[in-house]
Image (cartoon, rainbow, N blue to C red):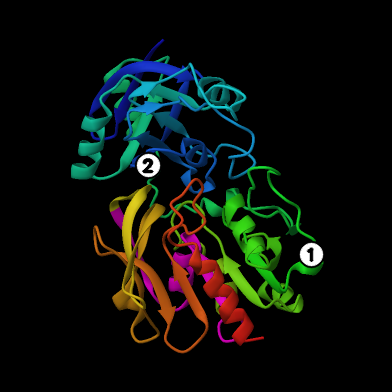
Amino acid sequence: MKAVLALSDGRIFKGRSFGASGEATGEVVFNTAMTGYQEVLTDPSYKGQMVTMTYTQIGNTGINGEDIESKQLYLSGFIVKEYHDCHSNWRATMSLDAYLKENGIVGIQGLDTRALTRHLRDNGAQNGIISTVDFDPESLVKKARAIPSMAGLDLASGVSTDKPYHWTQGLWDLEGGYPEVDAKNLKYKVVAYDFGIKYNILRCLVDAGCDVTVVPATFPAEEALAMNPDGIFLSNGPGDPEPLVKVQEEIRKFIGKKPIFGICLGHQLLGLALGGKTIKLKFGNHGSNLPVMDMETRKVEITAQNHGFAVDLESLGDVACLGHENLNDQTVEGIRHCTLPIYSVQHHPEASPGPHDSHYLFARFVELMEKNR
């Protein structure tokens, strides 16, 4: 079936549809990962966005029931060069096309994703629309221009859990899948704030010895402190961190009382809670092959990233220092509080299927909790 992608600046790309039929709207971004499209599809941080995969063949490993990162698909649309319906993987239970149809996600294939990616790099991420029912360029561009900007949008509240829950599932094992870990064997109590948390973050915390209670984005700090946790974790999530004023206020109540570790949106919210500012990047960083330097060890690690905003280091003054730096665009990839056991990173140390270079950050969180018990 014919499909069209229209960008808000008037650029039109023609292709063929796969997945669900109809129309999908959102901010169009590109992801440079060669593997792991199922992680991309189920990452809540992609809510409100349509993802372009720069790797050309997508769908050849199908879909399985173990590699999901959340309870549903949150992205708006999926854009690929070549979709392969004939999947080949021993873990696969269905095709990508069937998966998108089942979840109501519109996809487009057969367009020049290299041209689209270069256009987004030159002109910035922008709103767009995929349609299998309307092929009039003028009409589609008008619809794309009517979509709200990602800047200023609170999307985290819409993907957070409604009520607290306990998590004890560990990391995947080839023979046994995901193990259930006895809470008695978990030494450190952690309250994890859910702004769109990925399952593998929770599994990494458990694997590091953490007994994790997940709470909603607006959970009162007083109630979290009443649980007497050893540490506070701030998760990834979608949208602009600045509108989450109430969340920032709650985070401030933990500063100086508990060790804090933040990832992605949690990192940005921590920066704001410490008095800093955030900026919207031109096209963001999305992929699993981005180099980052740990400024403490001077080691370079290859990381997975998914973000459109970044912390402005200068706005933090002498409260926090640079913990990690993106070696591609020199943006802030992590901050460390100058005196307190508080740190955060923009990238994803839990990345599944990888890379795993940054996995040590969970052990660093445990070390901080041990020193400050």
Q: Is residue 249 above or below residue 155?
A: below
Please report the residue visible at 56 percent of the width from the left and 73 percent of the height from the top. Answer: 365
Please report the residue visible at 51 percent of the width from the left and 21 percent of the height from the top. Answer: 97
The disc at residue 183 is 1
Furthest toward the left, the residue is 122
Quadrant of the drawing holding the N terminus: top left
Asked whether the viewer can see residue 197, the reply is no
The total number of labels drawn is 2
> Residue 265 magenta-drawn?
yes
> Is the C-beta separation of discs 1 and 2 under 8 Å?
no
| Residue 344 percent coordinates (x, y) | 46, 70
Please report the residue visible at 63 percent of the width from the left and 56 percent of the height from the top. Answer: 203
Name the foreground residue: 311 vs 296.
296
| Magenta region, residue range | 255-281
Furthest toward the top, the residue is 1
Q: Is residue 335 above or below residue 193?
A: below
Quickly name the residue at label 2: 33
Furthest toward the front, the residue is 175
Name the foreground residue: 1 vs 298.
298
- Amino acid under disc 2: Ala
| Residue 41 percent coordinates (x, y) | 50, 37
**Snapshot quadrant of residue 187:** bottom right
Q: Is residue 41 above or below residue 343?
A: above
SS at mark 1? helix
Q: Is residue 48 left or right of residue 221?
A: left
Q: Is residue 50 above or below residue 298?
A: above
Name the foreground residue: 368 vs 123.
368
Q: Is residue 55 left or right of residue 210?
A: left
- Amino acid under disc 1: Ala
> Residue 254 magenta-drawn?
no
SS at mark 2? loop
